[in-house]
Image (spheres, rainbow, N blue to C red):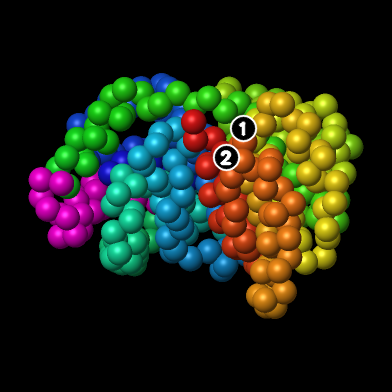
Amino acid sequence: MLIALFKLEDIGPALTQMVSSEETQFEGEIIDKFEFSGAMTYSLVFQGVVDLEEICSELYGPFPFAFSEGFVQYAFSFLVDDPTMQDKRMKKKTIGLLLCLVPEIVSKIDDFREEFAKLLIYKFHNIKSIDQVDEKLLTSIVNEYEGIVKELLSVSQANLLAQELKELISKGLFKTKVKKIALVYSKKEVEKIKNSFASFLLTLPFSFVKFENEIGIIKTKTFQFSIIPLEELDSDIANEQEVLLLMLDIMKEKYTSLKDSLIKKKNLKKIGVLIRYYVDIEKLSEEYGEFFNNLQDILENVAFFSSSYSTTKEFKTKLLESFFWGLIP
């Protein structure tokens, strides 16, 4: 396992430490990728938090890891004292996040997530200050994670997985092929999107940003992430996207022109659909079937991902999951 520690500083979250289950060297390209992955995760996990009392020690994931197949990431949130924090709104506290990379096969073991969550909560139940979240603590988490894996798998299997992680890191992780990805939203959700956009600005290591005519663009060293109203789905910027993540409410809208808009997009490699769901599951199932039947011939030619949400917290989690799915080569 690899753990990357992010903590909130006055300029936003910063990667402060990385610890692995094997002796490894973390070079610039690897650090850059984890900074991006951690910043994106940090933004979505803590987006919309207005009161420090809302923050608790909680495990999120597993999510796809955008830079390699065969591995997934978990995120663990916590709040501790930080005497160096200058932002008065933070009341001398910092919001921390552990980004934990593990082999996908481990995440599929029935009891792993529950045992891993117990381990992290136990390790942090007496942690009061950010100074206590040091290399010793992170190393102890890695060591006890290995103990969990060896209980759930054979020792030889666990050792093999640790070696695979070492080889993955030493090779610099796989190259990312997807460069342009966009979230498509209805203008009815513009206030939520503006808040999301502002949250991204505080966290992503971007090189260029603008928000104009309700279209947002964030460029980093590797990616361009755009936010596009559904009403602008036929625009030039929408046509150049390789991945579209569609934020839809199929119980209230028919999206009759969606198929015609999508079929024109020559660069499109993946479509992700985030659907708001309601208590009336039977009605939702009918609308869901009708919606996807309409798109069936398009989906035969592109990779497809679908998930649903009902709360803001679920939306953040599903968006994070779909975003990293979109970036996987």
Give the image location of residue 213, x and y in percent: 89, 37
Disc 2/disc 1 C-alpha distance (Å): 6 Å
The stretch drawn in magenta includes residue 145: yes
Q: Is residue 220 above or below residue 156?
A: above
Residue nearest the viewer, comparing 115 with 144: 115
Q: Which label belongs to residue 49? A: none
Residue topped by disc 2:
303
Q: Are marks 2 and 1 in contact (CB under 8 Å)?
A: yes
Residue 180, quarter of picture:
top right
Asked if residue 203 can be seen in this view, the reply is: no
Quarter occupied by the N terminus: top left
Identify the residue at horizontal 38%, vertical 61% (top origin). Answer: 128
> 227 left or right of 123?
right
Question: 10 Å neighbourhood of mark 1: few (<14), some, or many (≥20)?
Answer: some
Residue topped by disc 1:
269
Residue nearest the viewer, comparing 232 with 42: 232
- N-terminal-most mark, 2 or 1: 1
Give the image location of residue 268, x and y in percent: 67, 31
Identify the residue at horizontal 66%, vertical 51% (top origin). Answer: 273
Residue nearest the viewer, comparing 313 with 155: 155
* Stretch in magenta: 130-157
Give the image location of residue 25, x and y in percent: 28, 25
